[in-house]
Image (tube, rainbow, N blue to C red):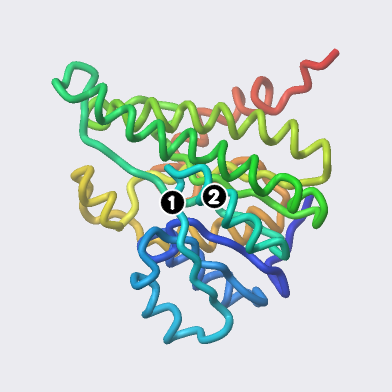
Amino acid sequence: MSTSIKNKIALVTGANRGIGKAIVESFINHGAQKVYLAVRNPQSTKVLENQHGDKVVTIQADLADADSIKALAKKTKDVDIVVNNAGVLGTASALSADVEEVFKKELDVNVFGLLRVADAFAETLVDRQGALVQLNSVASIRNFNHVSSYSASKAASYSFTQSLREELGAKGVSVLSVHPGPIDTDMGAAAGFEGAPGAESVSEGIVSALQAGDFHLFPDEMARQFEAAYQSYADNIVMADFSE
C-alpha cells in the first residue's frame, strides 16, 4: 500500500534529535501538513518549533509509560502516519555484569514501547488507512557483541513488527520496518561508530519506502549489504503467506 507524505499529518516519537529530527524535516520538506513531536522533554524541540512554526506541535510522551502513550493517542486522533523512532541503547555484552539491568530498560522502551504505540494508535490508523513506521536496526537480524542486549531488543521489536504488518495490514494500514546500519547520531557515537552516514539517509529512505509500499527499508550502504544477503529469506519466509 502506497503512502504519500504530502498533506498528511504525522507523529514522530523521539523527534528532538538524530534520526527523529531528520524524519520531521524530511516529512515537512515533502509536504506534510503537520508533524507532532512526541518527546520526553518538551523544551528539547524549540529549534524545530522556531524553524517550522505551526507545522510542528510538541507533545510530552514517554514510551516507557503506557498511560503517557494512551494520552498521546487521544490528543492526536487526526494522525495519518506514526513513526516510532524513540529508543535506547546500552553497551552490554551477553556476559556483562549489568546485562540484565540494561536489557530490561531496552525491552521496556524498544519492545514494550512499540507495543504501547501500536495498541494506542491502531484504531486511528485503521480509521484513516494510515501507516506505522518502526525504527529497527541491522542489529535486529545480527547480534553485535558490544551491544548484545540492544541487538536482542531490536530482534524482538522486528519480530513484533512482522506481526503488526499482518494484523494491521489486513485492516488497510501500511507497516514499514526500518533497518539502518550505524548512523551519525548520538546513539551511533555511543556505540563506538564514527564516520557514519547522516540521519537524512534514513529519513529520505522512509519517504521513498512509504511511497513504494515497502515493508523493509535498508537505507544506508552498510544496511544494503545486509539486505543483499537477507533478501531471499525475507521474500520467501518473512513475506510469505503461511496461512494455508
Where 36 sits versus 149, above or below?
A: below
At x 64%, y 53%, the residue is 209
C-alpha span from label 1 to label 2: 7 Å
Residue 212: x and y, percent? Answer: 71, 53
Q: Which residue, given by chain and number where applicable, does mark 2 sit on? A: 69
* 195 versus 162 height, above or below: below
Residue 151 lies in quadrant: top left
Residue at mark 1: 62
Amino acid tagged 1: Asp
Q: Is residue 209 left or right of residue 151?
A: right
In percent of width and height, residue 27 lies at 58, 70
Q: What element carries label 1?
A: loop
Mark 1 vs 2, N-terminal side? 1
Residue in view at x 47 percent, y 51 percent = 85
> In what quadrant of the picture does the C terminus appear?
top right
> Is 113 positioned to the left or the right of 147 in the image?
right
Say which residue appears at 51% left-offset and 36% top-offset: 227
Q: In this view, does 223 lie above or below 112?
A: below
| Label annotation for residue 133 | none
* CB-based contact (under 8 Å), mark 1 and mark 2: yes
- Label 2's element? helix
